[in-house]
Amino acid sequence: MTSSEPLTAPLGPVAVIIPTYNERDNLELIVTRVRASVPSVDVLIVDDNSPDGTGEIADKLAASDTRIHVMHRQGKSGLGTAYIAGFHWALDKGYGVMVEMDADGSHDPADLPKMLAALESADLVIGSRYVPGGTVVNWPKSREALSRGANVYVRLMLGISVHDATGGYRAYRADTLRGLGLDDVDSQGYCFQIDLTRRVVNSGGTVTEVPITFTERARGASKMSRSIIIEALWRVARWGVAARLLGKRRAAKTAS
């Protein structure tokens, strides 16, 4: 998706937001890789009181590097609220770019420079598995089929051309996030990614998809669950129906 005129505003400092829950085996490695890939970025770890001690590891990393910050939350409150808390923190601190990244190593920090470069002419950049050049490694065929099918469903229901609306590796401009009504977002899981994507599109923003290699986690357990899938299905259906009804009302008003 492209705009008629490229954006030219300077991006400003970058905050990479990494939500964690029981990621003690992965956290230090991913943070180290991020800092090596783009040394100028800051990292915010948002930990939901992980019982495995992830929060303590985060504090040790922050104590050794002034570009690493930690937000401790009281309990497991979901991916969406973790990112929104991180967005508000970064916006309050004056960061110009916010990056979403998983802690489990599925998102390669080596892809971050090209995503930040693409943000020079976009409001949202998605690290996409499903555009030419994008790949998925070590996923069962059934899991990949579910993910691809979900994205087809999103495109059909919402009428958007984004190929990986569920992708969680992405970069936003700060001004874009300010205009999305973050306090009204209550979706979680992969639905959270769809929600913010549609909000960018509906606001007239530019979305660019950059091909990435997504690699299934080597350590720890996936957070995917049946409830996450069900939430995405019914919310997307509700948004799609609401958009169609609104379009019909507008068409009727114009005709009258």
Image (spheres, helix red, strand yellow):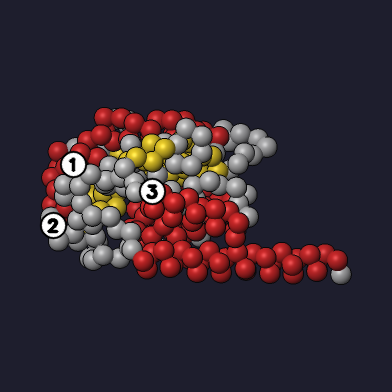
Q: Give the mark nearest the N terminus, 1 or 3.
A: 1
Work out whether 171 lies above or below 191.
above
Q: Can you tell which quarter of the image residue 88 is in? A: bottom left
Picture residue at 27% right of the left edge, 42% below the top:
105
Viewer-nearest residue: 205 or 78: 78
Give the amino acid at mark 1: Glu
Q: Label 2: how many residues lie within 10 Å, few (<14), some (14-19) or many (20+)?
A: few
Q: Label 1: how many residues lie within 10 Å, few (<14), some (14-19) or many (20+)?
A: some
Asked whether, in this view, residue 101 is left or right of residue 5, the answer is left
Q: Which residue is mark 3?
A: 141
Give the amino acid at mark 3: Lys
- How many dots with numbers? 3
Q: Label 3: how many residues lie within 10 Å, few (<14), some (14-19) or many (20+)?
A: few
Picture residue at 74% right of the left edge, 67% below the top:
248
Q: Secondary structure at mark 2?
A: loop
Q: Give the mark nearest the N terminus, 3 or 2.
A: 2
Find residue 218 and report its horizontal and vertical position in percent.
23, 44
Give the amino acid at mark 2: Asp
Question: Real-space Cα distance between discs 1 and 3?
Answer: 30 Å
Picture residue at 50% right of the left edge, 69% below the top:
234
Q: Secondary structure at mark 3?
A: helix
Residue 28, label in figure: 1
Find residue 84 and report its horizontal and vertical position in percent.
39, 57
Asked whether, in this view, residue 100 is left or right of residue 156, the answer is left
- Find the residue positioned furthest to the front: 141
Find residue 143 and report its horizontal and vertical position in percent.
38, 52
Q: Which residue is mark 2?
A: 52
Which quadrant is home to the C terminus? bottom right
Give the mark toward the camera: 1 or 3. 3
Q: Is residue 224 visible?
A: yes
